[in-house]
Image (cartoon, rainbow, N blue to C red):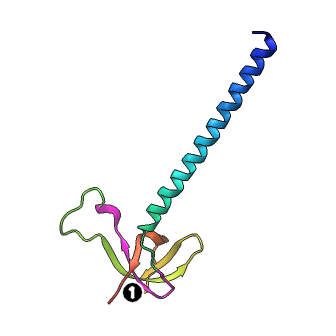
């Protein structure tokens, strides 16, 4: 094989390799999209507005769960909703909490 032929052959191999990488990337993205849709389908979404009562998940018992340990603290009143998915809460004694809480860590409180 001459020098030009070997360069053309190598170029063809590189093009085929790039095509295989592109196909693998598209396949991986499709798999990840399906996996995300399946996961998101199982998430519970609550509509929480300002003034609602909520319970907050207490993660300190995450690694050592006891049978009778309560994992939800509250009820708390929602004072402010933020666009990034967090909320400012206050207990029923009208004292504001020192930190904002992620909306995924709360669930509605029903009397």
Work out whether 75 lies above or below 31: below
42 within the magenta span = no
Q: Position of residue 86 (x, y in %)?
A: 52, 71
* Image x and y of residue 16, in percent: 67, 31
- Under tag 1, what secondary structure? loop
- The residue depicted at 44 percent of the width and 61 percent of the height is 39
Identify the magenta region. 47-61
Q: Position of residue 40 (x, y in %)?
A: 47, 65
- The residue closer to the viewer here, 43 or 108, is 43
Q: Is residue 72 left or right of residue 80?
A: left
Give me the residue at 34% from left, 68% from top.
58
Quick one: quadrant of the N terminus?
A: top right
Q: Which one is nearer the viewer's eye here, 59 or 95?
A: 59
In the rendered image, the vertical position of residue 5 relative to residue 43, given as above or below:
above
Task: Choose top left, top right, bottom left or bottom right for residue 18.
Answer: top right
**Which residue bears the numbered disc 1?**
92
88 sits to left or right of 110: right
Badge 1: residue crowd in 10 Å (few <14, some 14–19, many ≥20)? few
Q: Position of residue 13 (x, y in %)?
A: 68, 25
Reply yes or no: does residue 48 show up in magenta: yes
In which quadrant of the rendered view does residue 104 lie?
bottom left
Q: Nearer the viewer, residue 46 or 87?
A: 46
Q: Residue at x 28, y 56 (%)?
A: 63
Query: In the image shown, does 2 or 48 lie closer to the viewer?
Result: 2
């Amino acid at each position: 094989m001459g020098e030009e032929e070997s360069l053309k052959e190598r170029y063809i191999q590189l093009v085929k390799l790039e095509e295989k990488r592109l196909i693998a990337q598209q396949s991986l993205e499709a798999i990840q999209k399906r996996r995300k849709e399946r996961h998101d389908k199982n998430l519970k979404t609550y509509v929480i507005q300002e003034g609602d009562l909520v319970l907050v998940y207490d993660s300190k018992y995450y690694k050592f769960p006891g049978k009778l340990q309560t994992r939800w603290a509250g009820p708390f009143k929602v004072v402010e909703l933020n666009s990034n998915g967090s909320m400012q809460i206050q207990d029923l004694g009208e004292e504001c909490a020192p930190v904002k809480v992620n909306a995924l860590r709360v669930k509605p409180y029903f009397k």
